[in-house]
Image (tube, helix red, strand yellow):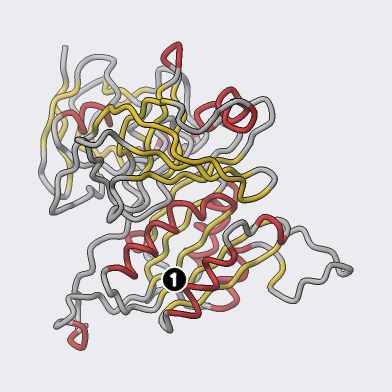
Amino acid sequence: MSHHVTVQPSGHTFEVEENEFILDAALRQGVAFPYGCRSGSCGTCLGQVLEGQVEYPDGLPLTVMEHEHEQGRAVFCVSVAKSDLVLEVKEITSSTEIEVKTLPARVASLRKLSDDVMEMTLTLPANERLAFRAGQYIDFLLKDNKRRAFSIANSPSNDETLEFHIRHVEGGYFTDHVFEQMKEKALVRIEGPHGSFFVRDAEVTGNDTDNKEQGQTAHPIIFIAGGTGFAPIKGMIEQLIEQGDERPLHLYWGVRRETDLYRDDLAKKWAFQHPQISYIPVLSDVSDDDDWRGRRGFVHQAVAEDFPDLSGFDVYMAGPPPMIEAAKKRFSELGLPEDQLFYDSFDYGAAKNK
């Protein structure tokens, strides 16, 4: 038995089969729900159930509190329909349809960027290309139907090579193999691109008359990376540079120690070569005895100190769930509209990323 789903405010409709996840049904029928992890841990696909009932076969996910569930808030990647539904979802609009492909790829290079971060580059077959948006991710397809998700770290302009920043998780099924056994020229299988974390097309809104000729919004962008959350943001910034986007770009990179700033040289180069880009590294685990003269504390706090009014900014952030959740709460207090915040929550301890 299937159920009919209507999406507001777009009016789009689709059918969801019994026990089919709502997000899967939407994507299968070309309805562009936002999504990220597809495991209920990131909250990207969070929306409102206006009419009808949904259920979670594996129990309520951590991203939805019991009282929120009772109020109709839901994540659609792990919920199923128990009746016809009317949902409120902010759909992704894109001028280009991107095909999800399953492809073989060869490991072109493995380079340690720090003690626990490996840069892996893959090359695709000569007759294949993977169209993607900067910030999206791919799944590595492993044995026994296992898969591991990692963000693409390069701009789509280089569609012959894919770059990834892989953090080593002790005991991790996949990352142990990458750090201890994988060799260059090894063959892997990938599927993608996935995810709705990418820079939205610049639009002129309201009274942004000064930017109409450039087709740009007046909103400057704040990028916030936590750890290897730098990877998708790197691709985004590279793409904006290539496009000649002149909006102010503020990059904040939060890590524990200075050695964790594994591409500090690249971020400094961006800031030096492009006057619209500023770069602020922030260390959270540094003592008074350390020779560090930069910012200290949590990265979202540094942003809050520098920008006490966020209503005029677009914010893109990628990193661990505690950083994302703390930033969302604080930035809402500073006036950041919900539709100007975009994020990708990296759960390093989750099985999908090991």
Q: Name the amino acid, label 1.
A: Gly
Binning the other alpha carbons within 10 Å of mark 1 as few (below 14), some (14 to 19) or many (20 upward) gives: some
Residue 17 lies left or right of residue 12; in this view the side is right
Q: Position of residue 59 (x, y in %)?
A: 47, 21
Q: Residue at x 16, y 21 (%)?
A: 3
- The residue closer to the viewer here, 243 or 85, is 243
* Residue picked out by circle 1: 335
Q: Position of residue 202 (x, y in %)?
A: 23, 68
Picture mark count: 1
Residue farthest bottom in this picture:
210
Q: Position of residue 20 (x, y in %)?
A: 27, 19
Residue 91 lies left or right of residue 65; in this view the side is left
Q: Is residue 267 above or below residue 107?
A: below
Q: Where, quadrant-wise, is the C terminus in this rendering?
A: top right
Classify residue 282 by image quadrant.
bottom right
- The residue closer to the viewer here, 159 or 138, is 159
- The residue closer to the viewer here, 12 or 95, is 95
Q: Residue at x 57, y 46 (%)?
A: 320
Q: Residue at x 84, y 67 (%)?
A: 290
Residue 7 lies left or right of residue 286; in this view the side is left
Q: Secondary structure at mark 1?
A: loop
Q: Residue at x 45, y 11 (%)?
A: 144
Residue 183 lies left or right of residue 18; in this view the side is right
Q: Where, quadrant-wise, is the N terminus in this rendering?
A: top left
